[in-house]
Image (cartoon, grey):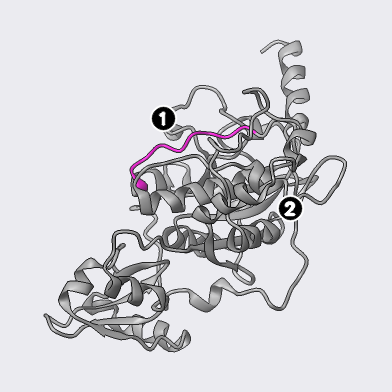
Amino acid sequence: MKLKDILKLIKRQPRFGKGALPDPYDYRDYKYEDVLGAEETVDWNKGYDIEKEIGAKIPFKNQGLSGSCVGQAISYYSGVLNTVETKKYDEVSAKSIYSLIELGLPQGGAYIRDGMKLVVDLGALFEKILSSYKNGLAPDEPYMKDKSWKTESILKLAKILQAKEYRTITNSLNMNTFAIAVKNNYGIVGGVNGSNNNTWNSFEPRTGPSSWGHALYFGKFGTDKLGKYIATPNSWGTRGNPDELHSDGWQKLREEWFTSEYMFSPWTLIDKPNFAGLSSEASAVLAKAEMKLIVEGTGSGRVGIVVNGKLLEISNDRKAAAALYLLANNGFGFTVNTTVFEELPKNHNF
């Protein structure tokens, strides 16, 4: 590579938009550790791939020079949760989130907690309603901060993408906890402290002295010949031609990243289920059954736990772990007939 090409690469990375700040401590935050499945383990060889889970490719976002990464990351997450229900991926507007939480800093920036709270309190808009691109191109900061779109009629549309609850990971900033959270919550959003060491132009960012904060949506994990990884689509566009280890174009963060030195403010979302199409009996159960035990009382005696609006059936070898989980979450539940049990939206086994 010629010297002039190297200089171009060095100049390029500092112009990536960033903008995530560590959340101030708030004792009222719900802790994700409180709802972790007892004795849960991670099968790194099997891994997890959100695109396979929802049956859709997730387009890469490009925040340009704006500091809108919090809005970008959470809009990935909101789009995924909506797809779980609708079976069709529709992009969610990063601008509809970021413009309402940005902190007024010259270079932009926001707290991840504020974005999560906004999606729970207000919701978000689809990209087709409010574009996050300026004249079809990657945006600048003033464009992403603009709130002129905000009207009462538009805000009513945001309710479609409203979530139910957000929780923070506090004491377990390790790779296993992140992977469990990704698998159980269709991904997570967290902050990462990065460096202008030029590796963020690649598929394998490397750690270094922390000089800025950036928010990422994590939606995949597994292991390859380089070891374990948790992957992100990032919001800095594409990174050239994928190779054998990165055929999906996602960046892989390795174990060195998952410490309190680099990771900060990771959050999960629980979606607010859309009950359209369910019977009144199933809707009523689902509306009040989060983290509760569901027993099929008129059939073969199947049991499950509702998590994120989906029924996770309990296998025989997991009954002890499920019992501990329910005790930790006051999970007294409901007995339903076979028809309702079959109708409840289902996910993987507990």
- Earlier residue among tags 2 and 1: 2
* Mark 2 surroundings within 10 Å by alpha-carbon count, few (fewer than 14), some (14 through 19), many (20 or more): many
Q: Residue 187 shows which numbered tag?
A: none
* Magenta extent: 54-62
The label nearer to you, 2 versus 1, is 2
Q: Secondary structure at mark 2?
A: loop
Rendered location of residue 123, percent (x, y): 58, 55
Amino acid at dot 2: Ile
Q: Is residue 162 left or right of residue 285?
A: right
Q: Residue 244 shows which numbered tag?
A: 1
Rendered location of residue 17, percent (x, y): 73, 36
Amino acid at dot 1: Glu
Judge whether residue 57 can be spotted in this image.
yes
Q: Is residue 135 left or right of residue 15?
A: left
Q: Residue 101 shows which numbered tag?
A: 2
Residue 301 is a magenta residue: no
Q: Nearer the viewer, residue 192 or 60?
A: 60
Q: CA distance from mark 2 to mark 1?
A: 39 Å
Judge whether residue 49 can be spotted in this image.
no
